Image: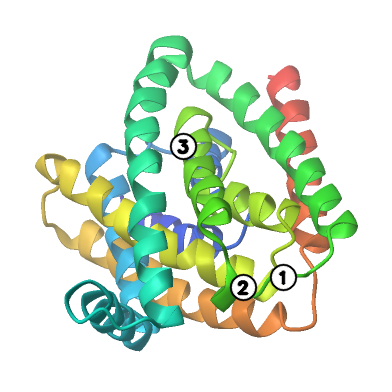
Amino acid sequence: MTILHSIILGVVQGLTEFLPISSSGHLNVFPWLFNWEMLSDGMDVALHIGTLLALVIFFFKDWINLLKAGYKKVVKKEDSNEGKIFWYLVIATIPAGILSLILDKVSDMIIGDDINFQMAIIAITLIVMGILLYIADKRSKSTTDYEHISLKQSILIGASQAIAAAFPGVSRSGITMTTARFLKVDRESAAKFSFMLAMPITLAAVIFDLTNFTFDLPIILGILASFITGVIVIKFLMDYLKKGSFKVFAIYRIIFGIIILGIYFFR
């Protein structure tokens, strides 16, 4: 893969990993659309390392406070919202991890390496999830904030991540934010909880796939591009959702999915 392609895909990863529009969908569509070399497993790991670092940097203080509070809750029996949230995140990650491994294997068997079939699936999931995100965001009230998310809500939001592992184009952030909105979590809190959930499962996925990772210049530049773009996008989304809605992302998903379907049938 060329240096230019690596940088472009790094920017694409940073833009789409945190917005609810599917990074896996875009990373598969771009090479298919422009007849580039398809994304290697090593480059895929590299791009996720970049966005994982973006999460670590942006939410570093939050995670330090969560870890301290989680420790105090168990060892010193000190109750706090941060201690509660920490253990909710731990509990929610377990079923997500197990289901993701299972559904990922099932997806590989069903979809396989047929790139055209993958594009059709991506287009359909972009559209379907766009519709669901629009409905969830428009009809659901915002009655729960980040500090008051319940254990039941945490588990449901966490488990929903597994669907993204099964179907490319669903979007991990998209499905978690959609589920959170259906459960009446406010928009900003839905995004933050989604990002906090993303860190452990992304870290596990990166570690699991490290055997496919090798250092070279395109890899390094891809990591750097996804990291810088990722930090900017997280900041943008957290600020935007204080007053904005998910409507624009839902509409984008639907339009992009229709375009992919059109190209698929034309080709």
Helix, strand or loop for disc 2: helix
Q: Is residue 7 visible?
A: no
State which mark lies toward you, 3 or 1.
Answer: 1
Coloring basis for residues: rainbow
Distance from Cα at disc 3 to Cα at disc 1: 22 Å
Name the one closer to the observer, 143 or 132.
143
Q: Residue at x 54, y 72 (%)?
A: 192
Residue 220 position, x and y percent, is 21, 65
Helix, strand or loop for disc 3: helix
Q: Are marks 2 and 1 in contact (CB under 8 Å)?
A: yes
Q: Residue at x 30, y 58 (%)?
A: 200
Between disc 3 and disc 1, whose residue precedes? 3
Between disc 3 and disc 2, whose residue precedes? 3
Distance from Cα at disc 2 to Cα at disc 1: 5 Å
Q: Residue at x 36, y 76 (%)?
A: 83
Helix, strand or loop for disc 1: loop
Residue 253 position, x and y percent, is 73, 47
Residue 256 position, x and y percent, is 74, 44
Q: Are marks 3 and 1 in contact (CB under 8 Å)?
A: no
Give the residue number, with chain letter if any, for mark 1.
Answer: 186
Q: Is residue 125 above or below residue 113?
A: below
Name the one closer to the observer, 258 or 109.
109
Point out which mark residue 145 bears: none
Q: Is residue 10 above or below residue 102?
A: below
Mark 1: amino acid? Asp
Point out which mark residue 189 bears: 2
Q: Is 15 left, or right, of 255 in this rendering?
A: left
Distance from Cα at disc 3 to Cα at disc 2: 20 Å
Give the residue number, with chain letter if any, for mark 3.
Answer: 162
